[in-house]
Image (cartoon, rainbow, N blue to C red):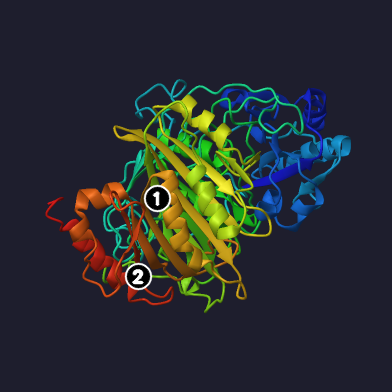
């Protein structure tokens, strides 16, 4: 098991301050670097990894600490430094060591520690910590019986007594994709380097997701506290995984997840994610991980299991690092949480990609998949669906809808395509959508969570240009008064530079959705940002945009817009005569028009059928057939 402790400080932890924190284990504590120096690992005298300390991150975006950590985040004004220590609780000393590291930073620099009460300044004795257990994926088999006993390798030891939590009921089937699971995709791919389509909604064309794990060099940057673009730390952050939650009827897209470390435009080392309270337990047959991946709780030949207990699981650079590492070792990542934990939009999109899973503990069924509801069991070193006598996957009762909610989300998926030239500035379409629908620009952007940089289209353009021709994926957030979360994926194509964007806006029971502004937005994007396609949907779900571990309502499609390029390829006469009662509105110049299709009222479930029929009609055009 593991536990996170996070220090939020108004001043940057410099070398001497960090050194004081690292001496929390006394002079016998070992220190080593990982992730090209972005992570410092504290080792017991026996060599066992105890705590991983991430490079400090300068967070300059209001509301990010509260969004991810809760009310404690309000106690430190922006800007502040986020330093995270992740400890293995398989060793009692490790948790106290992480608390002392962060507590010493607070004592010297001010600020607060999460979770409240974890900070101390004590010296933790680690001299009695046993050595690391072997990595099951690298163990060599024991020699044959006739070999010389004095030279033979010992057989792998059983789980250390006292470190294995409660058992998981046996049974199930081997993992691989998610066959038979409710809500799972009909096509699965077990290869870690590729994800099968997930979460397809009614009437949605196929969405394919490809993960790119090719590393790229990271560049050090030099910023002082309060500067908006650079820090004194080296940025080894992998780019965040691309969301794969296409909404109903969204035109076919190809999404690639880029886990390459960010280039010079990004700032700071990134904080980690994941925390495990004593209530979260691993399978009794699992082997605690203490080598190779020190931040992973259970490591088997096929799976890396991480136990997390914090308000929101976010797509931090640490989580991206783990994804890259487990994929490189051809393992699946399975995150286990108690039922009160929720996922950020970016983390949800990442864990929806097979073979990864979000696993939720449940007192009745043991464990279930937090995104599909499938009851799971631990078998052959991984969590797999528990099949019924009929060979079907059972659904956990805890996954049932929590009941009707008056809170709603407005979802916008759009794509632009513009010629590549030296004057091109990215992010303008996303900012336009943000301003039209909320009245303000995004508050911040980054490549991982917490999103730490003030919004700057010029800076994100520089980052994408530095990575070209490789793709770049970025995240954006709104201010604390309006829950808003966006993603931008930039790719270079034969036709130019393509931006694929997803924007989610949260609205409370007494807040009005800006549906009257949707047509205005479509027109502006067509005239100013080379809009290719846009789909707007509405669904009843949490205002804070996080994903709880139970079934939520599907998004209802509200409007579809086709840009001039797609209309021209389909044929104007064919495109403006769909087999639905609602007729499209013409946008842009008559010589090169775009078409905006309203599908009905936002709560009308017949919109699914209208979108399906419209999509089939557009695909049947003689010009495209």
In this picture, residue 296 sits left or right of residue 381? right
- Residue 470 appears at what percent x and percent y? 40, 29
Residue pictured at 68% horizontal, 59% vertical: 481
Q: Residue furthest front?
A: 590
Q: How far apart are the alpha carbons under marks 2 and 1?
A: 19 Å
Nearest to the observer: residue 331 or residue 267: 267
Q: Indicate the quadrant where residue 180 lies.
A: bottom left
10 Å crowding of disc 2: few (<14), some (14-19), many (20+): many
Q: Position of residue 197 (x, y in %)?
A: 32, 52
At horizontal 19% and vertical 57% (from top left) the residue drawn is: 619
Between residue 118 and residue 72, name the one nearer to us. Answer: 72
In the rendered image of this protein, does residue 459 appear above or below residue 401? above
- Closer to the N terminus: mark 2 or mark 1? 1
Q: Is residue 573 left or right of residue 365?
A: left
Task: Return the mark for residue 42.
Answer: none
| Image coordinates for residue 508, horizontal then vertical, percent | 61, 70
- Helix, strand or loop status at disc 1: helix
With respect to residue 58, does 576 lie above or below? below
Dividing the picture into quadrants, the one containing residue 396 is bottom left
To which residue does mark 2 refer?
599
The image quadrant that residue 214 belongs to is: top left
Q: Which residue is mark 1?
A: 526
Q: State whether residue 171 is above or below residue 111.
A: below
Could you tell me which residue is drawn at 21 percent across and 70 percent down? 579
Mark 1 is surrounded, within 10 Å at the Cα level, by few (under 14), some (14 to 19) or many (20 or more) other residues, namely many
Residue 147 percent location from the top left of the image: 37, 23
């Amino acid at each position: 098991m593991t536990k996170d402790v996070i220090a939020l400080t108004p001043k940057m932890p410099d070398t001497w301050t960090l050194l004081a924190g690292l001496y929390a284990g006394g002079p016998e504590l070992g220190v080593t670097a990982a992730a090209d120096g972005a992570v410092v690992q504290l080792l017991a005298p026996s060599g066992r990894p105890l705590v991983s300390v991430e490079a400090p991150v300068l967070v300059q975006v209001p509301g990010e600490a509260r969004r991810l950590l809760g009310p404690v985040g309000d106690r430190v004004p922006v800007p502040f430094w986020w330093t995270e220590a992740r400890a293995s609780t398989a060793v009692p000393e490790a948790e106290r060591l992480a608390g002392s590291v962060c507590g010493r930073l607070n004592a010297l620099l001010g600020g607060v520690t999460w979770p409240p009460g974890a900070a101390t300044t004590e010296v933790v004795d680690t001299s009695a910590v046993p050595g690391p257990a072997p990595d099951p994926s690298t163990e060599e088999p024991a020699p044959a019986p006739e070999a010389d006993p004095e030279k033979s390798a010992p057989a792998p030891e059983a789980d250390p007594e006292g470190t294995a939590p409660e058992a998981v009921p046996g049974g199930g089937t081997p993992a691989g994709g998610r066959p038979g699971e409710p809500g799972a995709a009909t096509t699965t791919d077990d290869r870690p380097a590729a994800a099968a389509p997930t979460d397809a909604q009614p009437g949605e064309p196929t969405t394919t997701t490809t993960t790119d794990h090719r590393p790229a060099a990271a560049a050090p940057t030099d910023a002082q506290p309060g500067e908006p673009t650079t820090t004194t730390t080296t940025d080894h952050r992998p780019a965040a995984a691309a969301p794969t939650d296409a909404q109903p009827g969204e035109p076919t897209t190809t999404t690639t997840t880029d886990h390459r470390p960010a280039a010079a435009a990004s700032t700071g080392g990134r904080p980690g994610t994941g925390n495990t309270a004593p209530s979260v337990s691993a399978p009794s047959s699992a082997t605690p991980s203490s080598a190779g991946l020190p931040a992973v709780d259970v490591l088997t030949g096929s799976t890396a299991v991480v136990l997390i207990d914090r308000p929101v699981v976010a797509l931090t650079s640490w989580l991206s690092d783990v994804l890259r590492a487990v994929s490189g070792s051809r393992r699946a990542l399975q995150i286990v949480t108690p039922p009160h934990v929720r996922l950020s939009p970016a983390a949800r999109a990442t864990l929806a990609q097979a073979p990864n899973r979000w696993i939720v503990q449940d007192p009745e069924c043991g464990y279930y998949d937090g995104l599909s509801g499938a009851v799971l069991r631990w078998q052959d070193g991984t969590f797999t669906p528990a099949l019924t006598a009929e060979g079907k996957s059972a659904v956990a009762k805890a996954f049932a809808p929590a009941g009707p909610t008056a809170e709603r989300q407005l979802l916008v998926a759009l794509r632009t395509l513009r010629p590549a030239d030296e004057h091109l500035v990215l992010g303008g379409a996303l900012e336009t959508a943000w301003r039209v629908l909320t009245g303000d620009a995004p508050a911040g952007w980054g490549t991982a969570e917490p999103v730490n940089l003030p919004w700057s289209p010029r800076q994100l353009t520089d980052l994408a240009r530095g990575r070209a021709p490789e793709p770049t994926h970025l995240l954006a957030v709104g201010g604390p008064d309006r829950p808003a979360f966006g993603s931008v994926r930039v790719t270079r194509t034969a036709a130019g530079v393509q931006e694929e964007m997803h924007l989610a806006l949260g609205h409370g029971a007494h807040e009005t959705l800006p549906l009257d502004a949707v047509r205005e937005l479509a027109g502006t994007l067509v005239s100013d940002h080379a809009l290719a396609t846009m789909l707007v949907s509405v669904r009843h779900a949490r205002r804070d945009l996080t994903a709880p571990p139970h079934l939520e309502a599907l998004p209802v499609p509200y409007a579809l817009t086709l840009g001039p390029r797609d209309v021209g390829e389909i044929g104007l006469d064919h495109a403006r005569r769909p087999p639905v009662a609602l007729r499209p509105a013409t946008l842009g110049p008559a010589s090169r028009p775009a078409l905006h299709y309203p599908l009905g009222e936002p709560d009308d479930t017949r919109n699914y059928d209208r979108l399906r029929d419209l999509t089939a009609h557009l695909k049947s055009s003689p010009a495209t057939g």
